Image (cartoon, rainbow, N blue to C red):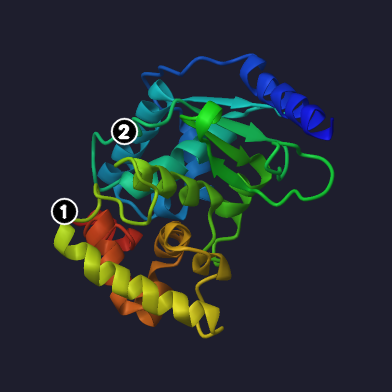
């Protein structure tokens, strides 16, 4: 009986997600000055770009809005929310103009952390973000507070939005395994996994400054260290030069260092 009730409860939550009023994708021709000012204040990566780089970043945001809906469940979605979701998407693919998340149709914002039943109240709520699977395929779920916190705490190397979009990049080849074929050629995979294994051992031994969640699995290591790469590139380069070089090879020359993003690729 309890299984039936749990199933019905989960079904009701999923129905809520799917029945919640949808906003269509946004097709906007011009980037507004207020949006530009917000990015300048909140997004370090954007702020470090030159004029041409900022214009390309803004085009990336508009393109993302035109192909992916951003909606809320029991939460209002503001322009600032949309900007931070899109910035999270654009940063990892900035080196690849024209690249799109073809495995994503919608980002759903929640008012708080949620659990595996998508509940935002009660116990066992520890999920900040999640790439959907099964009935939730082609959706990304994000805690709205966690999304904003990722861009407010600029020195912690933690950004939930970037983390989840790196998962999507990894999943592009059909397997979320920490080996995204779109970012690495076959000969590079072996040395990359060697680096991953070595650093995960250091994490487990308490000898790494990479946050412990990166030691959960190879699948989680990539997005965790990618957060570090984009949030604290100078520190990653100093403390983990091999990892930095490997991530720079994946995401493009200088993409981990916004100061380098102004240089021609």
Residue drawn at point x = 46 percent, y = 32 percent:
33
Residues packed near mark 1 inside 10 Å, few (<14), some (14 to 19) or many (20 plus): few
Residue drawn at point x = 39 percent, y = 67 percent:
233
247 horizontally vs 230: left or right: left
- Toward which corner of the image does residue 158 lie, by quadrant? bottom right
Q: Is residue 176 above or below residue 7?
A: below
151 horizontally vs 218: left or right: right
> Could you tell me residue 36's position as x and y percent?
45, 37
Q: Identify the residue at the far front of this view.
A: 1
Precedes in sequence: disc 2 or disc 1:
2
Q: Is residue 211 above or below residue 66?
A: below
- Residue 10 circle label: none
Residue ID for mark 1: 264
Element carrying mark 1: loop
The quadrant the N terminus occupies is top right
> Could you tell me residue 123's position as x and y percent?
82, 49
Residues packed near mark 2 inside 10 Å, few (<14), some (14 to 19) or many (20 plus): some
> Could you tell me residue 99's position as x and y percent?
26, 36
Q: CA distance from mark 2 to mark 1?
A: 21 Å
Residue ID for mark 2: 100
Closer to the camera in the image, 116 or 4: 4
Element carrying mark 2: loop
50 horizontally vs 188: left or right: right
Residue 190 seen anywhere in this rendered image of the structure: yes
Closer to the camera in the image, 202 or 226: 202
- Toward which corner of the image does residue 142 lie, by quadrant? top right
168 horizontally vs 1: left or right: left
Residue drawn at point x = 69 percent, y = 36 percent:
118
- Toward which corner of the image does residue 77 lie, by quadrant? top right
Q: Is residue 258 above or below residue 81?
A: below
Closer to the camera in the image, 42 or 250: 250
> Could you tell me residue 139's position as x and y percent?
51, 31
């Amino acid at each position: 009986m309890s299984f039936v009730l749990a199933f019905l409860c989960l079904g009701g939550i999923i129905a809520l997600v799917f029945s919640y009023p949808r906003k269509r994708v946004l097709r906007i021709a011009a980037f507004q000055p207020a949006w530009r000012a917000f990015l300048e204040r909140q997004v370090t990566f954007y702020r470090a770009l030159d004029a041409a780089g900022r214009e390309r970043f803004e085009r990336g945001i508009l393109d993302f809005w035109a192909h992916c809906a951003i909606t809320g469940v029991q939460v209002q979605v503001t322009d600032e929310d949309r900007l931070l979701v899109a910035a999270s998407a654009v940063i990892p693919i900035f080196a690849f103009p024209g690249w799109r998340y073809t495995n994503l149709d919608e980002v759903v914002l929640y008012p708080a952390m949620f659990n595996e039943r998508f509940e935002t109240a009660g116990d066992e709520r520890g999920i900040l973000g999640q790439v959907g699977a099964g009935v939730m395929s082609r959706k990304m779920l994000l805690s709205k507070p966690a999304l904003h916190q990722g861009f407010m705490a600029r020195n912690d190397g933690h950004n939930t939005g970037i983390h989840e979009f790196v998962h999507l990049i990894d999943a592009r080849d059909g397997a979320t395994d920490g080996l995204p074929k779109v970012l690495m050629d076959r000969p590079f995979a072996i040395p990359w996994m060697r680096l991953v294994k070595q650093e995960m051992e250091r994490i487990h031994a308490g000898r790494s400054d990479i946050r412990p969640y990166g030691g959960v699995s190879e699948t989680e290591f990539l997005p965790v260290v990618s957060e570090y790469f984009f949030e604290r590139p100078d520190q990653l380069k100093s403390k983990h030069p091999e990892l930095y070089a490997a991530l720079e090879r994946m995401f493009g020359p200088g993409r981990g260092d916004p100061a380098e993003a102004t240089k021609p690729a």
